[in-house]
Amino acid sequence: MSPRGVAIPDLRERLFAAAERVVARDGAAALTSRAVTAEAECAKGVLHTHFSGIDEFVAELVLDRFARSARFAEELASKAGRGTVEGNLAEVALALLNSLDPAIAGLAMTRPGASLHTRRALESGSPGFAAMQESVTAYLEAERLGGRIAPDADAATLSLALIGTVHHLLLTGGPGPAQHAETAQPAGETIRRLTAVLLGGARHDPKETA
C-alpha cells in the first residue's frame, strides 16, 4: 500500500482502473470507496480526498471514459479515404462500446447523485455522445465528398443511428440480453453487422453517376 502523505502519480486513473476491476470481478454492488482504495492499494480515505463521494467518483469515471472515446472519434477525420468506411466506423463504435463496463454506465445513470453530476458535466461541454456523433458526421461528410459513399447519403442521420445504437448497447449490457449471454453475438460481430446495415443504402455506385 502506498505510504500516507506520499504523492501518487496519475492517482485518478489508478482509482478508475481499480474501480473497473472491482466491478468486473465482483459486480456493481461491490463498488464502494473502501473496495476501490483497497484494490488500488491506497490509503482508505484517499478517494474522499479527491472526490466528494462515490457518486461523484462514478460520474467522473464515466466522463473520463466518454472523453477518451470522443478523442478517439476525432481521429476519424484523418482516416477519410483510407481503409474502408465500414471498418473505420466499426473501429470507433467498438472503442466506445468497450470503453465502459455496462454495470458502471448503469451506476452513473441510476444513482441520482452520479446521474446529476454526469448530466451537468455533459451540459457544460464535457465530451460525450454528442461530440462523438459530430466527429462521425464530419467523417461521413468527408467520405461523401471523396465519393466513397453516395452523394445523397445523410451523414448526420447515419451518425445518429450508429452512436445511438452503441449508446443503447452500452447502457443495456452489450449486444445480447444477459439471460442469453451464451448465445449472444460477440460485440465485434454486432458492430460489423450494424455498420453494414447502416451503409447498405449509402454505398456509392459509380454506375449511377456514369
Image (cartoon, rainbow, N blue to C red):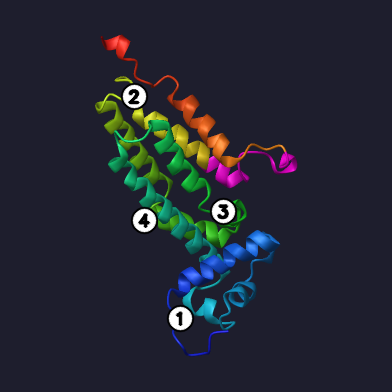
Vertical order, 59 against 190 (above or below): below
Q: Position of residue 17 (x, y in %)?
A: 53, 66
Label 4 or label 3, whichever comes before in sequence order: 3
Name the residue beneath numbered marker 1.
8
Q: Tell me the amino acid under the disc marked 3.
A: Ala
Which element carries disc 2, helix, strand or loop?
A: loop
Q: Tell me the amino acid under the disc marked 4.
A: Ser
Label 1 or label 3, whichever comes before in sequence order: 1
Tag nearer the camera, 4 or 2: 2
Q: Residue at x 68, y 40 (%)?
A: 177
Q: CA distance from mark 2 to mark 3?
A: 33 Å
Q: CA distance from mark 1 to mark 3?
A: 26 Å
Q: CA distance from mark 4 to mark 1?
A: 29 Å
Q: Point out the residue furthest to the front here.
A: 83
Q: Residue at x 73, y 41 (%)?
A: 182
Name the residue beneath numbered marker 2.
149
Which stretch is magenta?
Answer: 167-182
Q: Residue at x 38, y 32 (%)?
A: 84
Image quadrant in which the N terminus is located? bottom right
Name the residue beneath numbered marker 4.
124
- Viewer-closest of 183 and 55: 183
Which element carries disc 1, helix, strand or loop?
A: loop
